[in-house]
Image (tube, helix red, strand yellow):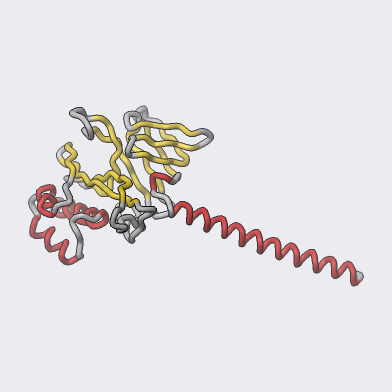
Amino acid sequence: MSFNLTLSYCVNKAMMKTMKIALFSLSLLLLGMTTSFAQNQFPSQVWHKGNIYTTDGKVYGGEIKYDLENNVVQLQDKTIDTFSAINVTYFELFDEIYGGVRKFFSLPYSLNSDYDTPIFFEVLTEGDNIALLCREYVATDSRGMNSYGMMGGYGMNPFYGPQSMMGHKLAFKYYFLKNGKIEQYSLKKKDLFEMLPGHDDQISLFMRKNRLAYDKRGDLLRITAYYNELNKN
């Protein structure tokens, strides 16, 4: 092989290597930008992989975006289809940014009228006696405080760590489902024991030992799961 051909071969090989490194770096940059963009949005503003289970027994899979304010869930596959809580039994999604599978059930409840209508509740934990539900919403963060954070797996302790964005924060309303009835929790400690009756001393000790609060998402999940375990004995 002549000197010129050898040089040309080496130059081309070096250029190909450089291009591969550049393309790899660009892909990492784009991935980082996508992740950063998603992390600067609230969960309801992001598309998640998931499934929708409708009342007629069908299952639809694809990218999911939910809107609890209007009680609809959208499915993006080849087109974008919208399902209301009336037509959905439940939907589940994997939150790739914060981690964990999340499940939302359509349950009858009276929000703004005297009549029960199907609306979506996220199920945080459930047992034979009681289930802890919640509905998230974006609230104005006038104090600049943080309220939303990293999310553990379903059945674990989701939403750790602080995050708020542009003067807004993710807030939650909590509900207990027991005896076939949904009751909203006031976030007052005395009302927590009314919602979880019969084991006041054990729950108080459990909260003290684990430094659990009565008004935080992950802590309420642990307390409710513990209560259900107590009722198994």
- Residue 192 in the image, given as x and y percentages of width and height: 13, 51
Q: Where is the N terminus found, in terms of image quarters?
A: bottom right
- Residue 25 in the image, given as x and y percentages of width and height: 61, 62
- Residue 214 in the image, given as x and y percentages of width and height: 18, 56
Of 215 and 197, the residue lying toward us: 215
Of 50 and 151, the residue lying toward us: 151
Q: State the image quarter where residue 208 is shown.
A: bottom left
Callout count: 0
Q: Residue furthest front?
A: 142
Left or right? Give the position of 96 relative to 203. Answer: right
Q: Residue at x 68, y 61 (%)?
A: 20
- Residue 224 in the image, given as x and y percentages of width and height: 19, 52
Of 207 and 29, the residue lying toward us: 29
Q: State the image quarter where residue 72 is shown.
A: top left
Q: State the image quarter where residue 53 is shown.
A: top left
Q: Residue at x 44, y 46 (%)?
A: 46
Left or right? Give the position of 149 relative to 206. Answer: right
Q: Residue furthest bottom?
A: 3
From what the image shows, is residue 163 above or below residue 129?
A: below
Q: Residue at x 27, y 32 (%)?
A: 118
Q: Residue at x 16, y 47 (%)?
A: 186
Left or right? Give the position of 32 relative to 65. Answer: right
From what the image shows, is residue 141 above or below residue 111?
A: below
Left or right? Give the position of 138 relative to 195. Answer: right
Q: Residue furthest right?
A: 2
